[in-house]
Image (cartoon, coloured by chain):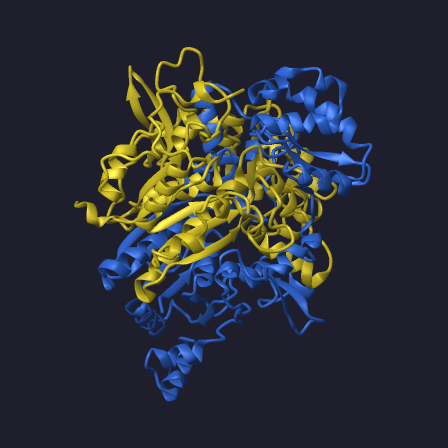
Chain colours: A blue, B yellow
């Protein structure tokens, strides 16, 4: 089994979660005080401690935890054991170890170093341009919810690590990978940057309206919001106006062309706003799907907890937790199609004993490492 | 360095995907050295990017600019999958492929005779990546989805912004990219597993699940607490004040994160917030969290008098973390300093901007290659993959895709 040492911050922790979903043995090496991801709110059951953070519980599921004082001599010696037996080490710049030293100590390892560069998620989003794409027109630009920008950085790190592990598998060769968090976020600006460079047009934030597909927006129905996205292909529009029966939209045959729809998208949205308000959202979504036009609820994460599709596919699993009755927990987007099992996130240092044994330390030596302050 | 150095050298990817999530997945595979062959048809070209380049653009015009970026480093074969010969050829190509990637909705590939069961019968090592909207099982397996419905249905639009805000989207295809990343990792991992097991597998990825997973912490918190988590907007539980403040000029903004008491004192001085200089409550982190609304108004009174560039540079000079909001234009104009974008496909003194990769490998990765013309590599792929010099299922190459797109 591939062994991966995980020293990532919130910027890379989704990478190592996905590598664990892929079936790898991911060991999170943490300071004895617990790493910063454990401290991020919200907290499960509103228990504010190092074990109940929702970010920790999600991102560290399926991993093992080893806690040690890496700033002590004995702790550094222990870490060199990890380096020696690791297939990959994924770390962020803020980790108290040096990627160059690690790579020199174990040339067959894949060493992935994520360069963080900014002081906060917000500054990183502002610097990358992503902030300019979220919010209401001319209103305050906003971060995406749930810190999903950080997932994009983690995803770039994850695919790079996966490819390098494949290479290692074939050739035995390791390598050092540097992931720039700044460039990763800028790369997510692809459509805006290429639109500007080819057309000279600056894409701006549009509230709940879509930008890429002309007739795409959240609409207020009689009983709340729903989402509709009329895909670009020609015949879909004909079918759509046949459904909506709006005199203005039906009267303009040029709207069969996506480019024309882009030019007149404000008019289209205004007509559809009025139409949508007259119907309940479930009815609108069902009719759109019947016509193979993409449509969905505008859901909250609380509503998604009971989603029948996620339950049917085994993405949401039932888990007995100490807090209460069984709760549904997300298994993961790669673990689900792989049919992989789910193990809840480890408590701080939960696997110290078994990992020390795997590294060849005796029970007596475990005690000595404890007494010298390394654990 | 020799070709063999790349992680996916020798891996043949037969790419049936279109628009964005699928092509992004296969572009990543190409970035790691895979031979990605895009299956296209004159009758059904990839519709990515509807709009035209500027009238004075003298560079390549046979594809849209976004297509050129999403499909660089791939080859193109033109096959009409609606013909028997075309389908037979696709099956033959799949018999020597390592990876098939498709993002059709459920049943389409089966109807074409290109389902996993059919293709894997003679190719046990095949890794077959299906990446439909909801997956090929479950009650919504036939449902259609796109980036915007993924943004909406995953919970992202309702998790973005402040308490009480209306739903909020991001003005790009964010969730298509999210699906593409997951598909790439799952496919590469299946290739690694094949090295030890000898057999490939089908992966029935659901882009909906990928999008939901990026909100996994909030989903888990909702599930356990049976309540929606707090929406932070631009604020942070770990720094106060933090926000995006309006500056002088149209749609000019600067993001500021005050990381501690010393930075707060420096900000008070820089912004001339003399009424706060002696306020003991605001000297402390928790006090600033409590009075965040009031502080924001005071900061904005100052920032609206200055340009965003000015606010940013003044604060950075004092060691206060600040970044003005940049836009695509800023990235293009400062593009040389980062690795995210580069130019390709130079002709007549014009070139196209494409996205690169935001990481470096010590053993190098292949340089990006310009995107193919439709059917450009039909003959070469037939020869290299199948040893054929021609096939009835191949369509002639096309000079300009856009001229043939109806509507």
| Residue that sits furthest to the bottom in the current view | A364
Nearer the observer, A124 or B307: A124
- Give how far across and how far down residue A82 sits, in percent: 33, 69
Of residues B312 and A344, the one nearer the viewer is A344
Q: Position of residue A356 (x, y in %)?
A: 38, 79
Residue that sits furthest to the left in the current view: B2
What is the x, y in percent for residue A193? 45, 28
* Picture mark count: 0
| Left or right: where B345 falls relative to A191 | left
Residue A222's image quarter?
A: top right
Q: Is residue A229 above or below residue B196?
A: above
Looking at the picture, how far across and down is residue A360, in whole percent? 32, 81
Task: Say which quarter of the image contains residue B102.
Answer: top left
Give me the residue at 56% from left, 31% from top. A132
Q: Is residue A11 visible?
A: yes
Q: Is residue A246 left or right of residue B397?
A: right
Q: Is residue A93 visible?
A: no
Q: Is residue B231 left or right of residue A5?
A: right
The residue at the point 74 percent across, 23 percent down is: A271
């Amino acid at each position: 089994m591939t062994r991966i040492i995980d020293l990532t911050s919130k910027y890379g922790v989704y990478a190592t979660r996905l590598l664990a979903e892929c079936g790898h043995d991911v060991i999170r090496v943490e300071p004895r005080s617990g790493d910063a991801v454990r401290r991020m709110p919200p907290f499960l059951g509103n228990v504010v401690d190092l074990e109940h953070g929702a970010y920790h519980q999600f991102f560290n599921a399926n991993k093992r935890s080893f806690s040690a004082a890496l700033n002590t001599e004995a702790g550094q010696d222990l870490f060199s054991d990890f380096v020696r037996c690791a297939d990959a080490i994924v770390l962020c710049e803020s980790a108290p170890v040096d990627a160059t030293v690690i790579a020199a100590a174990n040339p067959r390892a894949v060493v992935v170093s994520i360069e963080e560069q900014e002081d906060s998620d917000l500054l990183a989003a502002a610097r990358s341009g992503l902030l300019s794409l979220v919010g209401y027109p001319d209103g305050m630009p906003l971060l995406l919810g749930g810190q999903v920008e950080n997932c994009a950085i983690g995803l770039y790190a994850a695919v790079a690590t996966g490819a390098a592990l494949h290479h290692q598998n074939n050739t035995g060769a390791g390598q050092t990978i540097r992931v720039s968090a700044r460039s990763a976020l800028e790369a997510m600006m692809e459509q805006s940057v290429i639109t500007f460079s080819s057309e000279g047009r600056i894409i701006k934030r549009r509230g709940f309206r879509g930008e890429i597909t002309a007739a795409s927006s959240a609409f207020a129905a009689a009983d709340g919001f729903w989402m509709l996205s009329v895909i670009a292909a020609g015949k879909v529009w004909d079918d759509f106006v046949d459904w909506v029966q709006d005199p203005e939209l039906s009267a303009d045959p040029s709207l069969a062309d996506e480019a024309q729809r882009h030019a007149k998208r404000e008019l289209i949205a205004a007509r559809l706003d009025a139409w949508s308000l007259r119907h309940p959202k479930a009815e609108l979504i069902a009719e759109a799907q019947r016509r193979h036009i993409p449509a969905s609820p505008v859901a909250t994460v609380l509503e998604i907890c009971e989603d029948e599709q996620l339950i049917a596919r085994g993405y949401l699993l039932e888990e007995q937790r100490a807090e209460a009755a069984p709760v549904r927990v997300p298994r993961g987007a790669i673990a689900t199609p792989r049919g992989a099992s789910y193990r809840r996130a480890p408590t701080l240092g939960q696997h110290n004993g078994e990992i020390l044994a795997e590294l060849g330390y005796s029970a007596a030596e475990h005690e000595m490492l404890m007494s010298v302050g390394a654990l | 360095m020799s070709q063999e150095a790349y992680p996916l050298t020798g891996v043949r990817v037969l790419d049936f995907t279109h628009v964005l999530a699928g092509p992004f997945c296969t572009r990543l595979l190409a970035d790691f050295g895979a031979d990605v062959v895009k299956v296209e048809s004159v009758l059904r070209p990839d519709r990515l990017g509807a709009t035209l380049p500027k009238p004075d653009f003298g560079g390549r015009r046979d594809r849209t600019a976004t297509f050129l970026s999403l499909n660089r480093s791939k080859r193109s074969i033109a096959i009409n999958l609606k013909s028997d010969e075309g389908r037979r050829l696709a099956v033959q190509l799949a018999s020597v492929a390592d990876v098939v990637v498709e993002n059709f909705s459920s049943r389409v590939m089966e109807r074409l005779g290109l389902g996993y069961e059919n293709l894997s019968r003679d190719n046990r090592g095949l890794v077959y990546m299906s990446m439909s909207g909801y997956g090929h099982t479950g009650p919504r397996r036939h449902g259609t989805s796109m980036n915007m419905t993924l943004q909406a249905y995953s919970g992202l639009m309702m998790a973005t912004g402040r308490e009480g805000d209306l739903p909020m989207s991001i003005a790009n295809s964010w969730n298509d990219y999210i699906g593409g990343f997951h598909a790439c990792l799952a496919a590469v991992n299946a290739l690694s597993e094949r090295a030890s097991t000898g057999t490939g597998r089908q992966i029935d990825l659901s882009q909906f699940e990928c999008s939901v997973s990026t909100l996994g912490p909030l989903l888990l918190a909702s599930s356990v607490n049976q309540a929606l988590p707090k929406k932070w907007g631009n604020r942070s539980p770990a720094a106060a004040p933090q926000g995006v403040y309006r500056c002088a000029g149209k749609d000019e903004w600067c993001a500021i994160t005050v990381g501690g008491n010393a930075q707060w004192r420096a900000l008070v001085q820089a912004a001339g917030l003399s009424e706060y200089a002696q306020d003991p409550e605001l000297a402390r982190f928790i006090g600033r969290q409590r009075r965040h609304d009031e502080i924001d108004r005071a900061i904005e009174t100052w920032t609206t008098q200055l340009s965003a560039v000015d606010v940013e540079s003044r604060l950075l000079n004092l060691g206060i973390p600040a970044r003005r909001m940049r836009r695509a234009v800023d990235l293009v104009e400062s593009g040389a300093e980062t690795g995210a974008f580069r130019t390709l496909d130079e002709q007549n003194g014009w070139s196209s901007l494409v996205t690169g990769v935001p990481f470096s490998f010590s053993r190098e990765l292949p340089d990006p290659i310009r995107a193919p013309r439709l059917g450009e590599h039909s003959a070469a792929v037939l020869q290299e993959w199948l040893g054929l010099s021609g096939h009835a299922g191949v369509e002639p190459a096309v000079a300009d895709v856009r001229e043939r797109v109806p509507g």
